[in-house]
């Protein structure tokens, strides 16, 4: 199974476990490591634990460059990460 296929399977499983109520997500302020060294904007993050792993989910807004118009615009992406006990990402799900 490919790396991306495994990531899709993980996302589907977390989604199912959330819908079933097996896991609950806690809402909080973003960990400092999420935006350190960038201009990204993250207002909220959601965290949960499953099978001894810490998961973090958040919406990251960032500036992207449009070369044909020579200007920046805001874009966003959803990020799912597995974090260590200090809240630092050790794995990020591919987009």
Image (tube, helix red, strand yellow):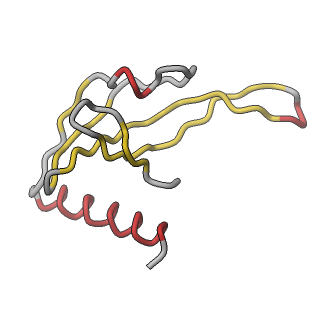
Q: Position of residue 2 (x, y in %)?
A: 48, 74
Residue 30 placement: quadrant: top left
Locate residue 69: give its quadrant.
top right
Q: Nearer the viewer, residue 32 or 67?
A: 32
**Residue 91 in the figure: left or right of residue 61:** left
What residue is shown at x 13% (from left), y 52% (from top)?
23
- Check the image and name the residue furthest to the bottom: 1
Q: Is residue 90 left or right of residue 54?
A: right
Q: Farthest left residue?
A: 22
In depth, the one of 42 and 82 nearer the eye is 82
Residue in the image at 70% along x and 32% along y: 64
Q: Quadrant of residue 10?
A: bottom left
Measured as percent of width and height from the top left, residue 88 is found at: 34, 33
- Give the number of callouts: 0
Is residue 91 left or right of 52 when viewed as pictured?
Answer: right
Q: Nearer the viewer, residue 35 or 68?
A: 35
Position of residue 19 relative to residue 35, above or below, is: below
The x and y percentages for residue 79 are: 43, 43
At 25% across and 59% down in the image, what residue appears?
Answer: 14
Residue drawn at 27 percent across, 59 percent down: 15
In the rendering, at what x and y percent does residue 12 appear? Answer: 32, 65
Looking at the image, residue 51 lies above or below residue 12: above
Quarter the N terminus occupies: bottom left
């Amino acid at each position: 199974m490919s790396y991306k296929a495994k990531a899709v399977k993980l996302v589907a499983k977390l989604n199912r476990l959330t819908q079933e109520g097996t896991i609950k997500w806690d809402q909080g302020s973003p960990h400092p490591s999420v935006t350190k060294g960038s201009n990204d904007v993250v207002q909220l993050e959601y965290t949960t634990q499953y099978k001894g792993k810490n998961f973090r989910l958040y919406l990251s807004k960032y500036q992207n460059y449009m070369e044909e118009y020579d200007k920046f615009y805001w874009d966003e992406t959803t990020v799912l990460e597995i974090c260590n006990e200090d809240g630092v990402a050790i794995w990020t799900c591919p987009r």
